[in-house]
Amino acid sequence: MDSQVVRDLLQRHDRLKGGRGVWNSHWREAAERVLPEYGNFDLVPTAGQKRSEKIFDSTAVNALPKFASAMESILIPITQKWHGMRTQMEDKNQQDDVKRWLEHCRDILFAVRSRPMGRFQPNINTALRSVGVFGNGVVFVEDDVGRNILYRGIDLARCWIMESFAGAVDTVHREFTSSARQLKQKFGELPELLRDRAGKEPDREFQILHCVKPADEYQDKKYRHFAFASWYVCIDTQEILEESGYRKMPYAFGRFDVAPAEVYGRSPAMSALADIKMLNEMAKTNIRMAHRAVDPPLLMPNDGILQAFSLRPGALNYGGVDDQGRQLVHPLQGGGQLPVSLEMEDQRRRSVNDSFYVTLFQVLVENPRMTATEAMLRAQEKGQLLGPSGSRLQGDLFGPIIAREFDILWNAGILPPPPKGIDVEEVFPEYTAPINRLMRSEEGAAMLRWAEQMAPIAQMDPSAMDIVDTEAWGRELADIDGVPMKVLLSPEQVQKKRDSRAANQNMEQAAAMAPAAGKALESMASAQAMATAAGPTLPMPLAA
């Protein structure tokens, strides 16, 4: 039975590898000019090998880390909690006990990611760099039982996928090499054939295949508790090292942009590949032009006296002039115009930087004095341009990571028990990253535009602004701009502050009226004293 399973897995693996030849060629071409250390598609990589021979201009090479850092800052900023947790029952989300439980679970997730041993942030950055070059980034979320959740960025060159009917990645094949010592550390007792070969060649590295597929494809009772079945297979000996399963997909496969009828994603580098190649060719040409300008070819007469002509500083070249002192050696003037060529290079550089969104993130740096409305409009532009790709990465890359983390921590008993009526399988992330606020910036821009339009109307009729709930207005703008909630007062605190202000105003009014009231009382007292001194007043007689 095991041998049949191994044959089936290896046959499917060969089909997946054979069907990706065009992608490998395209990715290798992009990697050679943007990320040469990853350019090992269809090739046997050699550690330490020099792979930058085709790079003559570093614009794309420098734009890639900026792209990865910018995407990281708007998707998973290290200084912010870039997602919350929600349930599928909206009425439950409004209950205080459910809110507290969801916030507690979120805080535990972020605490786990911040542990140095897990290496969450570095591996996510590696995946985002892969997204920038190849359009695909892979992260393996591994449960190191009893210690920590481990994150590992996976080389795309050694990873193959298949999609479900719904378009989600549900099958992953990954190849890697490992020594017998490492395999024993991970799997314990090794199969017989692998153990014998390792005994003869203790330092040999073996090719290992990890396959993760939907468990419902295999009618075996051992997988009834898992959503995905898993095999570690030694390709060299065709033996199974480990057979198990996962409740959640352990591989998160993020894609930047997916074309119709394609499984793998396309990248900014692939979109700009024509400009990148052209820029490198232009750089080579300009290098040759500059070299000729500084050290031009020389035109010399056909005379043997100049055969020993020297160009070193201070050299003496006899026979270089005629009897009249006219120069016999002249530099060859080329027809190229270096300034024009450099200007064309700059145009290509701007195009490459635009493809990697570098210029989009430099707007605020280049114009720091823009007004709040201008900044809001710029943010709106960013949200519109980055929203589709950012949302795809959140769904394909970070969604599976969060689901896997939540599953590991829940089954390890680290998460607190949920309130009554809450099913942990119905809990999902709610993204609050800067990119989500950028996508909401249209609301803020609309509010500011409306305020500007209402200003002249309010001057004619101040009551026109009575329709505005200024408190709700301020809270909504704060939420759109990402103002920390801790700097805002709660509605109860606001009401208490208003009551206190009203009481102080009443006291001030009373204090201001006190002198006038005292004079009035004094006048009344004086009038009463005069009336008492004059004696009783007789009533007037009634008319007949």
Image (cartoon, grey):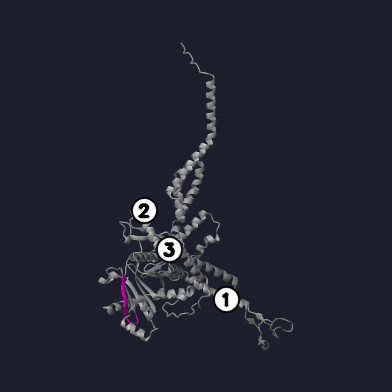
Q: CA distance from mark 2 to mark 1?
A: 67 Å
Q: Nearer the viewer, residue 167 or 49?
A: 49
Look at label 2 and name its amino acid: Asp
Residues at badges 2 and 1 in contact (C-beta under 8 Å)? no
Q: CA distance from mark 3 to mark 1?
A: 39 Å
Quadrant housing residue 270: bottom left
Residues at badges 3 and 1 in contact (C-beta under 8 Å)? no
Report the predominant secondary structure element of the magenta stretch.
strand
Q: Which residue is mark 1?
A: 287
* Disc number placed over residue 96 in the picture, else none: 2
Q: Secondary structure at mark 1?
A: helix
Q: Secondary structure at mark 2?
A: helix
Counting residues from the start of the chain, the first of labels 3 and 2 encountered is: 2
Look at label 3 and name its amino acid: Gly
Could you tell me residue 474's position as x and y percent? 46, 50
Residue 237 highlighted magenta (yes or no)? yes
Magenta range: 235-245
Query: Where is 479 relative to 358, above or below?
Result: above
Query: Where is 451 relative to 211, above or below?
Result: above
Could you tell me residue 39's position as x and y percent? 45, 76
Q: CA distance from mark 3 to mark 2?
A: 31 Å
Query: Where is 276 relative to 96, above or below?
Result: below
* Residue drawn at the location 39% of the way across and 61% of the way down: 106
Q: Which residue is mark 3?
A: 390
Counting residues from the start of the chain, the first of labels 3 and 1 encountered is: 1
Query: Where is 202 relative to 435, above or below?
Result: below
* Residue drawn at the location 72% of the way across and 84% of the way down: 322
